[in-house]
Image (spheres, helix red, strand yellow):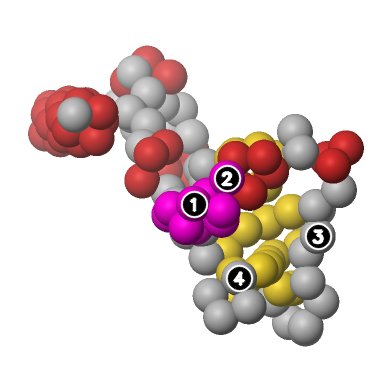
Amino acid sequence: MNKKIKIIELIDKIYHKNNIPKRIKYKYKIWLYDNVEERYCLESSFVTLSFETDRLTDEVEILEDNTEEIEELKPFDEIRDVSVWDNRILSTNQRAIAVKINEIIRYIKRKEKE
């Protein structure tokens, strides 16, 4: 899942030139940041994005940032998706792998907070 931030936070990033997202989604359109012009343009044209003051609390979706939203695997009892598991019971090896994946995810989350 992509991270979402408020427009006011995005404006702050642009103003301070701090981790400006290159691609965002706002109002069902994809916008690309132009470093030279220092503004967002519609992906397929030269239309620029302007923010109205009454929309500062609206959210934009940062498209390239997926790392902060790593989620742990669901408990084994909840995994019933036929397309993934063919409705089979997980083997011991599959359980061990899932446990190890969750340990890695927790480790990454801890390191990101430090």
Q: Amino acid at mark 4?
A: Glu
Tag 2 residue: 12
Label 4 belongs to which residue?
Answer: 38
**Is 46 situated left or right of 16 in this image?**
right
Q: Which residues are magenta?
A: 12-20
* Residue 50, numbered circle: 3
Disc 1 and disc 4 in contact, CB within 8 angstroms: no
User: Position of 107 compared to 18: left or right?
Assistant: left
Residue 60 versus residue 54: which sits nearer the camera?
54
Mark sitting earlier along the chain (1/4): 1
Q: Earlier in the sequence, mark 2 or mark 4?
A: 2
Q: Are marks 1 and 3 in contact (CB under 8 Å)?
A: no
As helix, strand or loop, the secondary structure at mark 4 comes to loop
Q: Quadrant of residue 4?
A: top right
Q: Position of residue 95 (x, y in %)?
A: 18, 27
For mark 2, does the 10 Å Cα neighbourhood hold few (<14), some (14 to 19), or many (20 or more) residues? Answer: few
Residue 1 at least partly seen: yes
Question: Disc 1, disc 2: CB below 8 Å?
Answer: yes
Residue 14 location in percent, x, y?
56, 56
Instruction: Name the amino acid, label 2.
Output: Asp
Separation of marks 1 and 4 at Cα, in angstroms: 12 Å
Q: Position of residue 78 (x, y in %)?
A: 43, 19
- Three-letter code for the amino acid on which mark 3 is drawn: Ser
Tell how many labels: 4
Q: What residue does disc 1 label? A: 16
